Image (spheres, rainbow, N blue to C red):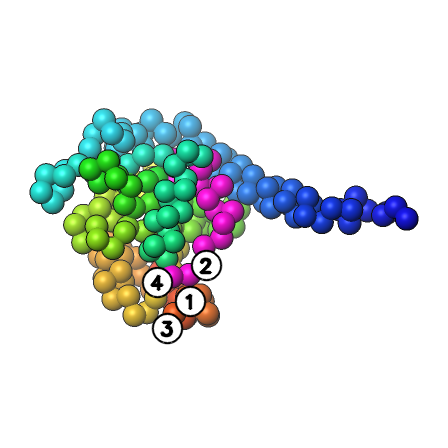
Amino acid sequence: MESSSPHLENDQTYEQEKTESEENEVVKQLIKLKINKNAQMIRKFYDGKTKPIRIAGNAKVYLEPITIKNCMQFKKINDAVCNYIFNEKLYFIASRSQEFARLAYYNDVAVGGLLIMPIKEGDGTFFLNLGVLEPYQQCGIGTIILEYALRVAQILTPIKAYHLQLQGSNERAIKFYEKHGFVKGKDIIENFYTDEPKDALLYIKQFRE
């Protein structure tokens, strides 16, 4: 007996097409920000390998776009840094997000990553995912990545605010983001982390109303 719905014939294919459609929708939202028009201004602030920043011990740090070829490096960094479940489809989004996704290289080794993506189309609120491998923390790399993200928000006026989640026990991260103008929101996301305390605190950086 033939199925009346083609979706029932191959649920796996349908789910894959549905996921790809959702992922492409996020990419389209980023494109709507006219990133290409403003990319030159962003690159003028920080132009990848052509303008490396030197930190601890005169080591060079530079940012590179996340692509299909290097997005697995971004995944490895997230797997090592994040103690929460990172949706796999976000790696697809990162590889197509142009100026909204970056890998940080320290002496030509990928040690940090950044992904900026809209939470809800049209409201100007963006999710900020930033991580640096533990051995390379507290030497300025996180600051370089965050300054890049803040510059993107300054240039692209549709970005009204960044949101990020922090574990209450992560005092070092809380101090880092508070130093850069993030303030604690009222919302608490329950059971966000895989270890205690499992609830996540919402931190917000508001740029414009």
**Total marks placed:** 4
- Amino acid tagged 3: Pro
The residue drawn where x is 31% and y is 61% is 183
Residue range of the region highlighted in magenta in the rendering:
83-101
Q: Nearer the viewer, residue 40 or 2?
A: 2
Q: Nearer the viewer, residue 126 or 101?
A: 101
The residue drawn where x is 34% and y is 66% is 167
Residue 18 in the image: state x and y as whole percent: 64, 45
Q: Which mark is residue 4?
A: none
Tell me the CA gap for discs 4 and 3: 11 Å
Image depth: mark 4 or mark 3 in front: 3
Q: Which mark is residue 194?
A: 1
| Residue extending farthest left | 57
Tell me the CA gap for discs 1 and 4: 13 Å
Q: Earlier in the sequence, mark 2 or mark 3?
A: 2
What residue is shown with label 4?
A: 166
The residue drawn where x is 90% and y is 48% is 1
What residue is shown with label 2?
A: 85
Residue 105 in the image: state x and y as whole percent: 26, 39
| Residue extending farthest front | 1
What residue is shown with label 3?
A: 197
Image depth: mark 4 or mark 2 in front: 2
Residue 98 in magenta stretch:
yes
Q: Residues within 10 Å of mark 2 (few under 14, many from 20)?
A: few
**Image marks 2 and 3: residues in contact by CB distance under 8 Å:** no
Q: Earlier in the sequence, mark 1 or mark 4?
A: 4
Tell me the CA gap for discs 2 and 3: 15 Å
